[in-house]
Image: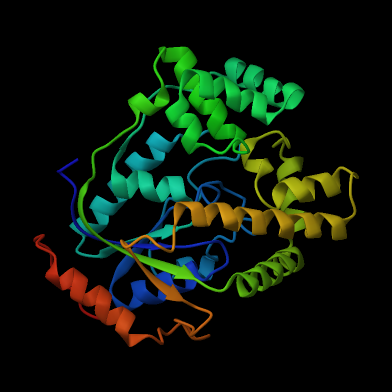
Amino acid sequence: MSDHCGPLIAIIGPTAVGKTALSIALGRRLKGQVVSADSRQIYRRMDIGTAKATPEEQALLPHHLLDIVEPDDVLTLAQYQALAYNAIDAILTQGDLPLLVGGTGQYVRAVLEGWTIPEIPPDQTLRAELERVADQEGIQALHSRLEAVDPVAAARIDARNVRRVVRALEVHTLTGQPISDLQRKDPPGYDVLQIGLTMERSLLYSRIDTRIDRMVAEGLVQEVASLLGRGYGPELPSMTGLGYRQIVQHLQGQIELAEAIRLCKRATRRFVRQQYNWFRLANPDIHWYDLGEAPLVDPGGQILNDALVDRVRSFTDSTTRTRPSMEDR
């Protein structure tokens, strides 16, 4: 992938930590454009529950890879990766700074590490059969099948991540080859600076609780009801994401709204723990900023940490790639 070149800033970290605010503030300060790396914000009409940048925020600078598929469409990791590279290259061609922003570890690492992803189209019949195994025999039984045919992939994939286990088994069944053999890395030629946002876990959990309460106040229940009314069934991957699954259960009369909110908060906390497996605090390639110690962006959208801006500007100025210099807007 050596044809990709230029500086690329990745802003990563767990959900609700403040990535959107920093990306907008940094993009406005340094003439940047956002490339979303969020596997749920790709869906149209799923705005509140995915914490998508608001129309007002999106108007402040260009955003890419938001609202690109319908909730019942499939976007493979390979397709996302190709779209991300196209967006990043287009931004660099315009002389702007690409900001890869999101908390979906697979998306971020597929782009930064240049994963070679098997172009095997999904087989819905096979997937349904494998998902039945998980339902009837348990997720460990399904994971044991993967261990038998691809122990390398099984060691990488948590048994609770049924979707990834199913995909690995699907690829092996359709190709006769382990997915771990087909997945290689061919890093792109971008000069990458990774900025990680974090905070003490109890503070982050409190932010998550506040965010979910705000989502409900802003109309999350109505958003999910509208999606169901349009015919998007609760079995769709898009509708089983955080928040949507629990609100669907409420709308179907299975649980009270208060219980749906409680379950959503609990599931989001669990998701944060999974995100830190992708973005490890000990990773020397990530420059971590603890937002619990000091905020990076004020309520008016101005960056409070000049050292962070200087780090990014120094990095982009020092890249060996031929590119127009960046000035403050």
Quarter placement of the C terminus:
bottom left
Judged left or right of residue 45, residue 283 is: left
At x 73% / y 57%, what residue is drawn?
266
Q: Quadrant of residue 272?
A: bottom right
Q: Is residue 48 above or below residue 134?
A: below
Residue 197 x %, y %: 45, 69
Residue 47 x %, y %: 61, 56
Residue 265 x %, y %: 72, 60
Q: Nearer the viewer, residue 11 or 270?
A: 270
Quarter placement of the N terminus:
top left
Camera sees residue 73:
no
Judged left or right of residue 248, residue 8 is: left
At x 89% / y 49%, what residue is drawn?
255
Q: Is residue 243 above or below residue 160?
A: below
At x 37% / y 48%, what residue is drawn?
109
Q: Quadrant of residue 80?
A: top left
Camera sees residue 100:
yes
Q: Nearer the viewer, residue 148 or 162?
A: 148
Residue 201 x %, y %: 60, 69
Q: Is residue 323 above or below residue 129?
A: below
